[in-house]
Amino acid sequence: MGKSQFTELFHRHHGNPILTANDLTYPANTVFNAGAAKVDGDILLLIRVEDKRGISHLTAARSCDGIHNWRIDPEPTLPPSPDTHPEEIWGIEDPRLTYLEEKDVWAVTYTAYSKGGPLVSLALTKDFRTFERQGPVMPPEDKDAALFPRRFDGRWAMIHRPVPHITGAGAHIWISYSPDLKHWGDHRMLIPARRGGWWDANKIGLSPPPIETQDGWLILYHGVRVTGSGVIYRLGLALLDLNNPGRLIARSDEWVFGPSEGYELFGDVDKVVFPCGWIRDSDKILLYYGGADSCIALATASLSEMLSWLREHNNMAEE
Ligand code: BMA
């Protein structure tokens, strides 16, 4: 395969968008940015639902094939709980789901929209019906967080994206470690946003949780390009060392997916593709993404094609 500039790694489902607010049994403004998991033989999406106040909650949808016949909870599955968790006053958003084998539990990392700004919160669940909130794990402003499924040298690891208050410092992807999922430290920058004219200049963030492959942890991340007519959210690939996820070993030069269809170009926020979940079925990847902050769409890809493309397109340059 040559270095063709527009290799299509991701193939949109012909029936996109697969879910809109009309599929809910209760009124809402939009559905988008869903986490994804395989649970009890179903594909489960934990959907971000924005109500007509502008506040988001999470609702579970289940389907046998991950495409059709979604069985959506008839009321919010995980509503914000500002009485017990004041940091959730303006809603909860953008969940990422990681199965922690050692604990036989799903970790849900999500954005809690607090009076002090968006922060990262963690909840644990076995069935996506009842949840045990662990509270905030990163202070504001921080979002786009996901856990790795296992420990490294005894410590859990989490990717996240703090935003510094210094103008021009850029918003980069970081990694932090914890002995107990509660106390986090050893914070390090993991993937810096590029600078200048790059598609991923100045502001990036993790999209779905990392996937373990023979080449390393595969990362899909978003780059936020500021243009004269607003921002464009596009996606690129990176790889982290399997035993030391704090080590970046590859990063794509070009983006691999960006908004081009009507449901990605026009919505509450135009020109956005924003995945929070992907499902692996041997070599096949099902990528679930929010389109223009207004609907949920599906694209498929081959894991081995992504890895071989990344080998050819590895460019660690930051400038
Ligand atoms: C990001 C997040 C996402 C959203 C995206 C585009 O900052 O808030 O939830 O999809 O912006 O608006």
Image (tube, rainbow, N blue to C red):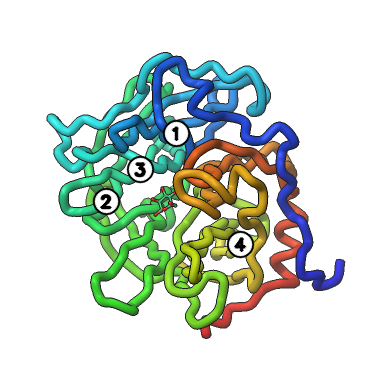
Q: Residue at x 28, y 77 (%)?
A: 167
Residue 215, x across and y down, in percent: 66, 61
Q: Do the residues labelled 2 and 3 touch (CB within 8 Å)?
A: no
Q: Which amino acid does label 2 sit on?
A: Leu
Q: Tell me the CA gap for discs 4 and 1.
A: 28 Å
Question: Sequence-wise, which precedes: disc 2 or disc 1?
Answer: 1
Q: Which amino acid does label 4 sit on?
A: Leu
Q: Is mark 4 within 8 Å of ligand 1?
A: no
Q: Tell me the CA gap for discs 4 and 3.
A: 22 Å
Please indicate, yes or no, whether residue 244 appears anywhere in the rendered image: no
Q: Nearer the viewer, mark 3 or mark 1?
A: 1
Q: Residues within 10 Å of mark 1 (few under 14, many from 20)?
A: many
Where 219 falls versus 129 (above or below)? below
Residue at the disc numbered 1: 30
For residue 9, which numbered disc appears in the image? none
Quick one: SS at disc 1? strand
Q: Residues within 10 Å of mark 3 (few under 14, many from 20)?
A: many
Where 319 falls versus 260 (above or below)? below
Residue at the disc numbered 2: 119
Residue at the disc numbered 3: 110
For residue 237, which numbered disc appears in the image? 4
| Residue 291 or residue 164, whichever sits in front | 291
Q: What residue type is labelled 1?
A: Thr
Quick one: SS at disc 2? strand
Q: Are marks 4 and 3 in contact (CB under 8 Å)?
A: no
Q: Is residue 188 left or right of residue 97?
A: left
Q: Which of marks 2 and 1 is in front?
A: 1
